[in-house]
Image: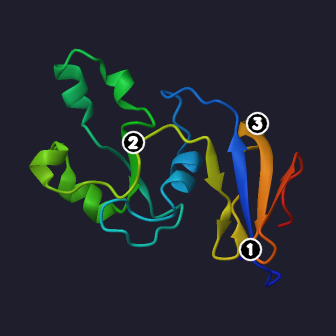
Amino acid sequence: MDTSGTNIEHYARLKPLLDTNVVRTVLFLRDGYRCVFCRIPLTYQSSTVDHYWSRDFYKKAGLGKAKATSFSNCVQCCEPCNARKGNLLPEEWGIKPHTYLANPSIVRLDHHGKIHRLQTQLIAEHISYNAKTGEWIVSKTPPPA
């Protein structure tokens, strides 16, 4: 819901991003402002980036540490979960993320009635959804703040 009290949700369709060019803001928006492990709400400042499969795992597998930092391997999480997981593999830790580890093409910009800012060079187009009318509106201009 936006700040004016209407039932409008704002999204952005992203320009194609390289999987290995992880943008923290996009990761935060993809994971829905929550820790992907315990689901507590996060702020941009309180969140950390976790490598789901550790960089050491990638190195030992011969894939190189650089490929470990990708949308298909990075998640937003709280500091306690990041510290508890450490370098453990997902099956060793026993918790699966509550998100789909992929390079996102659309992200939701609304966050508790506020529009979350995203770098304009990443956005292909803005999309708004009006829940009252069921109408989708596509625009090149950003939604109102």
* Mark 3 surroundings: few (<14), some (14-19) or many (≥20) residues within 10 A: few
Cβ atoms at labels 1 and 2 below 8 Å apart: no
Q: CA distance from mark 3 to mark 1?
A: 28 Å
> Looking at the image, which residue sits at the far front?
134
- Nearest the camera: 79 or 121? 121
Residue drawn 55% across the image and 42% down it: 104
Whichever of labels 3 and 1 marks the residue nearer the N terminus, that label is 3
Q: Is residue 137 left or right of residue 104?
A: right
* Mark 2 surroundings: few (<14), some (14-19) or many (≥20) residues within 10 A: many
SS assignment at label 1: loop
Residue 109 position in % (x across, y down)? 68, 60
Quadrant location, the N terminus: bottom right
Circle 2 is placed at which residue position? 74
Residue drawn 44% across the image and 60% down it: 47
- Nearest the camera: 53 or 127? 127
Q: Is residue 107 in sight in this rendering?
A: yes
- Nearest the camera: 66 or 95? 95
| Residue 70 sits in quarter | top left
Residue 15 position in % (x across, y down)? 70, 33
Residue 116 position in % (x across, y down)? 69, 61
Q: Is residue 44 left or right of residue 132?
A: left
Q: Nearer the viewer, mark 3 or mark 1?
A: 1
